[in-house]
Image (tube, helix red, strand yellow):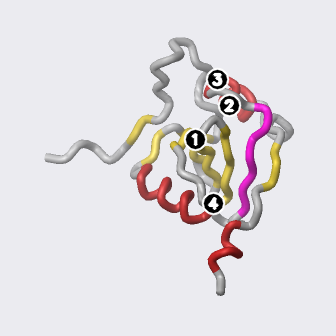
Amino acid sequence: MSPPAVADLSKDVHSSKSPPVPTGWSAELIDPKIVQTMLQYSTGLTGTIELAEDQGPRYIFLSGKDYYIWNTTSEEGWRILNVKNRDELYSNVAKGKGGLKLEELPDYGDNLEG
């Protein structure tokens, strides 16, 4: 029997008092490997999913030491400039609009077209 496909991404072994998952976002994904593959194809970055928008098209992931947000509908992404760890991520996302300082990613998809 295989393990459950749901992954709880909110568990941080380095922090015992992390802020709660921001409202409107989830730290659980049905199949995070599929999303990670999609993000790698879309951005060229490999990473770990940190948050998924509950009823929306956005994912936040960690690649290297940087956090990124990707919108699957618009196929646009940004590097998050003012977050260095999961606690800051949760706190700043919870602030809503203006909580994250963003830098737009280059259009990675254009490099795939002949």
From the top left corner, tell me how far across and down residue 77 is, in percent: 72, 56
- Real-space CA distance between mark 3 and mark 4, rounded to the nearest whole angstrom: 24 Å
The residue beneath circle 4 is: 43
The residue tagged 1 is 51
Residue on which the image places disc 3: 87
- Give the farthest residue toward the top: 16
Mark 3 against mark 4, which lies toward the viewer? 4
Where residue 52 appears, as percent x and y from the top left, is 57, 46
Which residue occupies the foreground of this view, 6 or 78? 78
Nearest the viewer among 64 and 58 is 64
Q: Residues within 10 Å of mark 3 (few under 14, many from 20)?
A: some
Please report contact status of discs 3 and 2: CB closer than 8 Å, yes or no. Answer: yes
Question: Dot 1, how many residues are within 10 Å of its Cα: few (below 14), some (14-19), or many (20+)?
Answer: many
Distance (Cα) linking label 4 and label 2:
20 Å
Chain part drawn in magenta: 76-82
Secondary structure at badge 3 equals: helix
In reply to whether residue 81 is colored magenta, the answer given is yes
Q: Earlier in the sequence, mark 2 or mark 1?
A: 1
Residue at the spot x=59%, y=43% of the render? Answer: 63
Mark 4 or mark 3, which is nearer the start of the sequence? Answer: 4
Inter-mark Cα distance, 2 to 1: 9 Å
Please name the amino acid that badge 3 sits on.
Answer: Asp
Residue picked out by circle 2: 89
Q: CA distance from mark 4 to mark 1?
A: 17 Å
Q: Residue at x 68, y 31 (%)?
A: 89
Q: Secondary structure at mark 2?
A: helix
